[in-house]
Every structure is written in structure tokens, then in C-alpha cells.
Image (cartoon, helix red, strand yellow):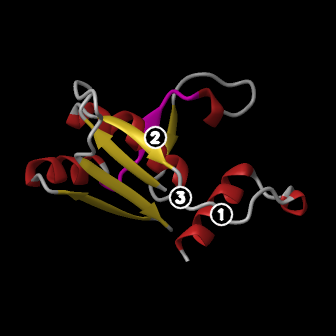
Amino acid sequence: MRVEFASPDDEQKRTLATAEWRAGAITVSSEDEELRTKLAHAFRRTPVVTDDPSYRRLGTSGPVVLQPGDLAWFRAVTEGRAEAETGLEARFVPGAPVGGYDPAAGYLPFEEQVERLDARAGS
């Protein structure tokens, strides 16, 4: 999974920095040393709190703590901590399309399907 960061004031949305998640490892890159440092700090491997209802158990409310390392954590950090600490907008960039819909893989949870397709795209 790749995320590009751009200034909210830039109409052309030029990419100033990128962050890439691959099998739990995060790579941050930018030509601006200060921005790269801020993003590396935002993506530090600590739990993140999110108030996204999709992560809650049925019948519960309130924020949820996501542990570091998985794709859900990467997304929550991107949309929360990284945007707040840098002041930049994030946009998720799809990887290379590999495979497609596989009805036989319907037994996997959605997040595992995304991780499997993402892993195959990087090969």
C-alpha cells in the first residue's frame, strides 16, 4: 500500500512525500529532510487511537486502539497522526492490478484479501 502526501493548498497536488507499507515494514521517502523526519515520527511503531466505527465490535461505541504493524494501523496513522503532524493531505495510491475478484477466496476476511492482493502486486 502506498500513500502520497501533498500540500492542501497546491492545486496540482504535487507529491511532496510518500509512505509505503509492505508486510508490516514502512518506508518513508521525501526530498525534504524535515518532512521525512516528521513522517518517520508519525509512523513510529506505537498504537494509534481511531474513532472509526468500522473497527468497533458490534454493539460498542467510542474510540478503538489499533496495534502497530498491520494495514489497518497504517491507514489509521496516515489519516490521523501523519496528516496532523505534517499538515499535508494523504491520498492512497492503488498498486498494480493483480488477479481480481476471486469468489473462491470469499472465506478470507476482507483485510486479509487486500493484504494478499497487495503482496502479489509487489512480487
- Say what amino acid the circle numbered 1 marks: Leu
Quadrant assignment, res 99: bottom right
Q: Residues in magenta?
A: 44-52
Residue 22 is left or right of residue 40, and the answer is right
- In this view, the residue in front, 121 or 14, is 14
Magenta-colored stretch includes residue 80: no
Question: Residue 63 placed where, x, y %?
Answer: 51, 28
Disc 3, SS: loop
Q: Main secondary structure of the magenta part?
A: loop
Q: 120 above or below 103? A: below
Question: Which residue is denoted by mark 2 in the rendering?
Answer: 76
**Tag 2's secondary structure?**
helix
CA distance for labels 2 and 3: 19 Å
Circle 2 crowding by C-alpha within 10 Å: few under 14, some 14–19, many from 20: some
Which of the 4 image quarters holds residue 28? bottom left
Element assignment for label 1: helix
Please state which amino acid type lies under the numbered disc 3: Gly
Residue 117 image position (x, y, % from top left): 65, 63
Q: Earlier in the sequence, mark 1 or mark 3?
A: 3
Report the residue marked by disc 1. Answer: 117
Residue at 62% in and 71% down? 120
Residue 95 circle label: 3
Left or right placement of residue 31 versus residue 55 in this view: left
Residue placed most toward the observer, 80 or 48 = 80
Q: Residue at x 31, y 53 (%)?
A: 18
Are the residues flagged by discs 2 and 3 in contact, CB closer than 8 Å? no
Label number found at residue 80 = none
